[in-house]
Image (cartoon, rainbow, N blue to C red):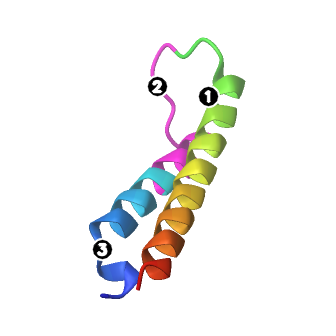
Amino acid sequence: MKPGYKTTEYWMSVATALVGLMVALGVLEPEGADSPALLKIVGGGMAGVASLGYSLARGLAKLKL
């Protein structure tokens, strides 16, 4: 099994988590956003779900050695 950082799943989850964090921190904000506070909550959730999803997927992959 190759190291986690060499997998596509890792890089996709990192990209998703980074975008989520940037939205949560207000660095990325779509024009015409009606509720910036809601966007920050969704961005934080997005980052958390991406990290959790990768952790679970990697754990399951290691179980099936």
Q: 10 Å neighbourhood of mark 1: few (<14), some, or many (≥20)? A: many
> Which amino acid, by three-letter code, is at mark 2?
Pro
Per the image, label 3 sits on a secondary structure element best described as: loop
> Which amino acid, by three-letter code, is at mark 1?
Leu
> Which amino acid, by three-letter code, is at mark 3?
Thr
Q: Which region of the structure is painted magenta?
A: 18-32
Q: On residue 4, which mark appears?
A: none
**Mark 2 highlights which residue?**
30
Question: Residue 37, percent across and down?
Answer: 71, 26
Front position among marks 3 and 2: 3
Q: 10 Å neighbourhood of mark 2: few (<14), some, or many (≥20)? A: few
**Mark 1 highlights which residue?**
39
User: In the rendered image of this protein, does residue 24 appear above or below residue 50?
Assistant: above
Question: Residue 4, percent across and down?
Answer: 39, 80
| CB under 8 Å between discs 3 and 2 | no
Front position among marks 1 and 3: 3
Per the image, label 2 sits on a secondary structure element best described as: loop
* 30 falls in the magenta region: yes
Residue at horizontal 58 percent and vertical 49 percent from the top: 49
Q: On residue 7, which mark appears?
A: 3
Per the image, label 1 sits on a secondary structure element best described as: helix
Q: Could you tell me if residue 25 is visible in this image?
A: no
Q: Quadrant of the C terminus?
A: bottom left
User: In the rendered image of this protein, does residue 44 appear above or below residue 63?
Assistant: above
Precedes in sequence: disc 2 or disc 1? 2
Closer to the camera, 57 or 34? 57
